[in-house]
């Protein structure tokens, strides 16, 4: 006898068959057919209660499409910003002042200009030199053409800092990290020729959930854990506006991070890991509270226990009602950090072309700055 599934029963119901006909076809009882129908009804009810249907957003009324389209065009103008050529002589004069050794022939702004072209079009250095030759021939202000090795070496020497094009006095940030490959070779080549797995680098960011600007960015190797970089990301974000709230996933879960958020006065939505069941957790909380009182009576420092208690109390609230916790903390806003990575990888790909860590950091920072500038232009389209 063939196994009858709920999908098979539903398919026949939609085809106009009744319960008796379905039971006869599969040689099962009518109660068995009703079992599948009840199972489907319960599933639909659960989904409706958990995810109530929301009215669809009318994006045509939310977005000014003329401004949005103009913003997409503006992105090309940003990449090919020719003002760098007008300051060629003045910038070189400043760079070569008191310089020991060979003089610079190309200003840093010109190297940044070429790096932007390489990042957005994902070309190799030799192709970039060909593009440069054609541009220099057409622009009178440009004095010379750099070869591909010079471009590569100068890119590693640049000092590239994070640029933010829209700031708020107070901001709520969302944090996350993603991996970027240091090699663009595919899995086929690695398996075919038994290649050693290339290490990847991690990009840690904090994004302002209101204006979508990346307000802090750190590049590390793959061994650095997310929870070790939370304080560094917040410190950098503070330079562009007071951080009043933070949305973080389980990767940042540690008692030190919960304590740090509290000490900074930041309303944190840090999702805890399920390290124990609720019943056992309640017992542990009670034990820690007793230990804290004993230490206080002996005039000892109970700070480590308080950090542990703070994290357990957050876990308790989450385990009691995770949906209510997410709603209370507005945890859904954390997706805006993931959205930044989606934009980053669609614009620039999932790998880096630089080899040394210094060059990789400069490359990634240039890409983040470009993304911030593109985002600032496109957000003007929102009404």
Image: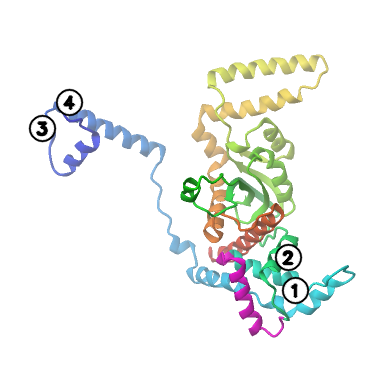
Task: Count residues near mark 3 (Cα–Cα under 10 Å), then give few for <14, some for 14-19, many for 20+.
Answer: few
Q: Is residue 217 above or below residue 324?
A: below
Position of 71 with respect to 129 (left or right) is left
Q: Is residue 340 above or below residue 26?
A: below
Task: Count residues near mark 2 (Cα–Cα under 10 Å), then give few for <14, some for 14-19, many for 20+.
Answer: some
Inter-mark Cα distance, 4 to 3: 10 Å
Q: Cβ–Cβ below 8 Å for labels 2 and 1?
A: yes
Q: Earlier in the sequence, mark 4 or mark 3?
A: 3
- Please give the residue where the numbered disc 3 appears in the rendered image: 20
Q: Residue at x 17, y 30 (%)?
A: 2
Q: Residue at x 61, y 80 (%)?
A: 134
- Please give the residue where the numbered disc 4 appears in the rendered image: 31
Q: Nearer the viewer, residue 348 or 25?
A: 348
Give me the disc on residue 106: 1
Q: Earlier in the sequence, mark 1 or mark 4?
A: 4
Inter-mark Cα distance, 2 to 1: 9 Å
Task: Give how far across and how far down residue 127 sits, in percent.
Answer: 58, 71
Inter-mark Cα distance, 4 to 2: 77 Å
Position of 179 with respect to 17 (left or right) is right
Q: Residue at x 76, y 14 (%)?
A: 294
Q: Is residue 274 above or below residue 215?
A: above
Task: Count residues near mark 1 (Cα–Cα under 10 Å), then give few for <14, some for 14-19, many for 20+.
Answer: many
Q: Is residue 282 visible?
A: yes
- Please give the residue where the numbered disc 2 appears in the rendered image: 154
Q: Cβ–Cβ below 8 Å for labels 4 and 3?
A: no
Q: Is residue 198 above or below residue 382?
A: above
Q: Residue at x 51, y 45 (%)?
A: 194
Inter-mark Cα distance, 2 to 3: 79 Å
Position of 184 with respect to 246 (left or right) is left
Task: Give how far across and how far down residue 179 sits, in percent.
Answer: 58, 47
Region rendered in magenta = 120-142
Point out the frontmost of discs 2 and 3: 2
């Amino acid at each position: 006898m063939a196994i009858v599934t709920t999908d098979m029963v539903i398919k026949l119901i939609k085809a106009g068959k009744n319960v008796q006909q379905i039971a006869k076809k599969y040689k099962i009882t009518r109660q068995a057919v009703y079992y599948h129908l009840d199972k489907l009804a319960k599933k639909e009810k659960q989904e409706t209660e958990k995810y109530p249907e929301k009215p669809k957003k009318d994006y045509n009324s939310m977005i000014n499409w003329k401004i949005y389209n103009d913003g997409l065009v503006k992105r090309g103008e940003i990449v090919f910003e020719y003002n760098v050529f007008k300051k060629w002589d003045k910038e070189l004069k400043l760079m070569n002042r008191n310089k020991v050794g060979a003089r610079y022939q190309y200003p840093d702004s010109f190297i940044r200009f070429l790096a932007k072209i390489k990042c957005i079009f994902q070309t190799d250095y030799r192709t970039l030199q060909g593009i440069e030759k054609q541009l220099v021939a057409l622009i009178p202000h440009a004095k010379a053409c750099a070869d591909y090795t010079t471009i590569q070496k100068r890119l590693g020497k640049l000092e590239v800092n994070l640029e933010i094009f829209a700031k708020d006095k107070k901001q709520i940030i969302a944090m996350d990290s993603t991996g970027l490959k240091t090699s663009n070779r595919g899995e086929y080549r690695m398996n075919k020729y038994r290649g050693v797995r290339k290490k990847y680098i991690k990009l840690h960011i904090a994004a302002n959930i209101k204006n979508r600007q990346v307000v802090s960015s750190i590049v590390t190797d793959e061994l650095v854990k997310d929870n070790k970089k939370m304080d560094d990301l917040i410190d950098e974000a503070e330079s562009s506006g007071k951080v009043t709230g933070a949305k973080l996933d389980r990767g940042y879960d540690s008692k030190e991070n919960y304590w740090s958020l509290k000490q900074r006065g930041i309303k944190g939505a840090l999702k805890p890991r399920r390290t124990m069941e609720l019943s056992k957790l309640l017992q542990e909380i009670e034990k820690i509270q007793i230990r804290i009182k004993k230490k206080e009576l002996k005039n000892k420092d109970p700070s480590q226990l308080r950090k542990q208690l703070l994290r357990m109390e957050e876990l308790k609230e989450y385990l009691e009602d995770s949906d209510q916790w997410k709603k209370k903390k507005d945890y859904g806003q954390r997706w805006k950090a993931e959205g930044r990575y989606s934009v980053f990888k669609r614009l620039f790909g999932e790998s880096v072309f630089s080899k040394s860590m210094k060059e990789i950091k400069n490359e990634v920072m240039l890409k983040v700055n470009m993304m911030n500038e593109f985002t600032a232009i496109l957000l003007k389209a929102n009404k």
